[in-house]
Amino acid sequence: MRDTSMPVAAMSIRRAESLQRTPATSTKLGERLNTGNLMSTNIETIAVKRNDGSDASLADYAGKVRLVVNVASKCGLTPQYEGLQRLYEEKRAAGLEVLAFPANNFKGQEPGTDAQIRDFCTTQYHVTFPLFAKISALGDDRHPLYTALVQAKPEAIGEGPFRERLKGFGIERENPADILWNFEKFLIGRNGQVVARFSPDVKADDPRLLAAIDAELAKSGRCQQ
């Protein structure tokens, strides 16, 4: 009579080992399933400073549609402040926040202190939307906020012509995902997801930007898509 005790025992051992591994496997699966929410969570909880030095984060504007813009006071695009202020006034009641982050990464076109930047914005362009402390949007010292934004949206809408224009001045990004210049725009939906990125020369009244903003404003709550 053939002895089958060893195979049965071996099968029992393998089954027991499989059951022991199940919790770990489930945990890893759960981690993978949750990664879809990590980007929005990270962006909203990254610490930043307001222009007055107080602590802040994008979570302070949770549930709003947010337009994040790296700004500068001595750039050819600086007059965009006027359009951004008008956009803010027109759509704030509907839930839009324009969040301005001064950066001096592009030919030193934002050299002032936070106090000087605030004075310039309020006196020259009557800015009332939130203004944050000076930040780095490019390079080895790039702020974590901009690292997260660039990772979320590596390409900007309408960037082709402006990228070519910069090449004419001998300016070319080694990493094409990097911020091109001042006044690049990231649109963050009510749910905390980065939904679009726009080239620096896409103005506040550009139909492409307005359509994207209106589409996000039409959505309600913070339900993940």
Image (cartoon, rainbow, N blue to C red):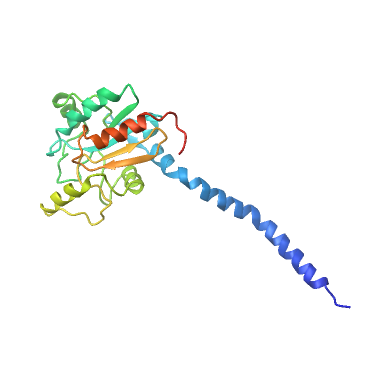
Residue 57 visible:
no
- Left or right, residue 62 beside residue 26: left
Q: 50 or 224, which is in the foreground?
A: 224
- Left or right, residue 29 beside residue 50: right
Image x and y of residue 67, in percent? 30, 34
Q: Quadrant of the N terminus?
A: bottom right
What residue is at 33 percent from the left and 42 percent from the top?
A: 145
Image x and y of residue 150, in percent? 32, 47
Question: Looking at the image, is 212 positioned above or below residue 93?
Answer: below
Q: Quadrant of residue 72?
A: top left
Image x and y of residue 26, in percent? 61, 51
Q: How many marks?
A: 0
Question: Looking at the image, is 130 positioned above or below residue 36?
Answer: above
Q: 145 or 198, which is in the foreground?
A: 198
Furthest residue in direction right, as rendered? 1
Residue 73 visible:
yes
Furthest residue in direction bottom, as rendered? 1
Image x and y of residue 22, in percent? 65, 55
Question: Looking at the image, is 155 positioned above or below residue 115?
Answer: below
What residue is at 16 percent from the left and 26 percent from the top?
A: 125
Q: 91 or 85, which is in the foreground?
A: 91
What residue is at 69 percent from the left and 57 percent from the top?
A: 19
Q: Quadrant of the C terminus?
A: top left
